């Protein structure tokens, strides 16, 4: 025993023995451990509660951003477009015909409404005999102007290609190897290759527009052989979303599922996707 235990034994007349002291000390240590454990558990529970509250608030914040951001950006872009058109068109309206002259407030969308009405009226007259005659005379006049003739012809061809119902422009999303083998890029078929370009190529090629990310209005025009093009099952809208998002927004796979017995991995250009016939 220790000197302290011996002194306690003598003073107590043998009542306080070292074994009792050991048991009492052990009990005190156990009680202290339990108290420390309870305090530690309480602190952990409080910490978890605080962390859980912060996590929930953070999730609520990001959920609010995800809900309001698309709506807010759409409303903002629409408002900017309407304001831009109004600022360019409204000044041309004579004051006597402008409703804003008699009202103490402006009318949002007045310029847009005027443009839509004017285009509809022009289309109505152009569909008639007199309108077709005027359009034909205007085209013949533009064809005689060296510089304007080329610009007008190119713009007219682009507009007719985009708005023509039977056109296949921007109707198919394809996968091509670019800029090197085994490196794949997303593109859009814009039409059949014709004229001098097709005459100089040994194989039948098609026009493929390769957009850039995140601005799909710029890109590259490629002439690619038919057999090297893989048509995807996604729509043009889904393809544009994928390009703009940099691959973050990926459309679902609409290919028919393989049989369970088939373990062969899918290959681009294989049986899972359709090639241009």
Image (spheres, rainbow, N blue to C red):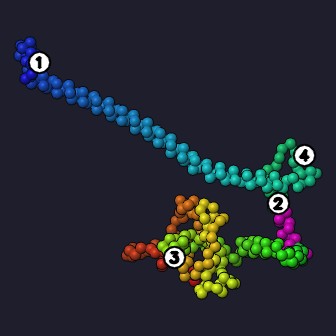
Residues shaded magenta: 117-130
Q: Earlier in the sequence, mark 1 or mark 3?
A: 1
What distance separates the C-alpha of mark 2 from that of mark 3?
44 Å
Q: 27 or 245: which is nearer to us?
A: 245
- Give the distance between the C-alpha atoms of the residues marked 1 and 4, in whole angstroms: 106 Å
Q: Which residue is mark 2?
A: 115
Q: In the rendered structure, does residue 122 fall within the stretch colored magenta?
A: yes
- Mark 4 vs mark 3, CA separation in Å: 62 Å
User: Which residue does the numbered mark 1 point to in the structure image?
Assistant: 4
* Quadrant (top left/top right/bottom left/bottom right) for the N terminus: top left
* Pointer 4 with pointer 3, Cβ within 8 A: no
Label 3, secondary structure: give it: loop
Q: Position of residue 260 (x, y in %)?
A: 39, 73
Q: Earlier in the sequence, mark 1 or mark 4?
A: 1
Circle 4 is placed at which residue position? Answer: 102
Q: Report how far apart the C-alphas of labels 1 and 3 lie in the structure.
A: 89 Å
Label 1 sits on a secondary structure element that is helix
**Main SS of the magenta segment?**
helix
Of the numbered discs 4 and 2, the one sitting upstream in the chain is 4
Residue 256 in view: no
Q: Earlier in the sequence, mark 4 or mark 3?
A: 4
Residue located at (61% from left, 82% from top): 205
Rendered residue at 90%/47% (across/down):
101
Residue 189: where, in percent of width, then height? 62, 75
């Amino acid at each position: 025993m220790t000197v302290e235990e011996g002194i306690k034994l003598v003073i107590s007349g043998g009542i306080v023995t070292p074994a009792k002291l050991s048991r009492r000390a052990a009990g005190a240590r156990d009680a202290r451990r339990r108290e420390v454990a309870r305090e530690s558990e309480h602190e952990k529970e409080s910490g978890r509660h605080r962390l859980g509250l912060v996590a929930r608030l953070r999730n609520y914040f990001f959920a609010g951003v995800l809900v309001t951001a698309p709506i807010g950006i759409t409303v903002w872009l629409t408002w900017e477009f309407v304001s831009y058109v109004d600022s360019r068109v409204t000044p041309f309206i004579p004051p006597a015909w402008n409703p804003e002259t008699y009202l103490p407030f402006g009318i949002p969308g007045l310029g847009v409404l005027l443009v839509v009405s004017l285009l509809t009226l022009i289309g109505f007259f152009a569909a008639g005999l007199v309108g077709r005659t005027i359009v034909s005379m205007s085209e013949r006049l533009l064809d005689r102007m060296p510089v304007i003739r080329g610009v007008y012809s190119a713009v007219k061809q682009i507009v007719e290609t985009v708005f023509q119902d039977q056109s296949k422009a921007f109707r198919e999303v394809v996968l091509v190897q670019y800029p090197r083998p085994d490196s794949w890029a997303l593109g859009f078929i814009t039409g059949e290759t014709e004229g001098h370009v097709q005459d100089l190529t040994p194989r039948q090629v098609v026009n493929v527009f390769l957009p850039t990310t995140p601005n799909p209005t710029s890109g590259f025009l490629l002439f690619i052989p038919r057999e090297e093009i893989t048509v995807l099952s996604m729509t043009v809208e889904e393809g544009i979303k994928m390009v703009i998002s940099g691959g973050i927004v990926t459309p679902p796979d609409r290919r028919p599922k393989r049989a369970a017995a088939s373990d062969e991995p899918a290959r681009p250009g294989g049986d899972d996707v359709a090639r241009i016939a």
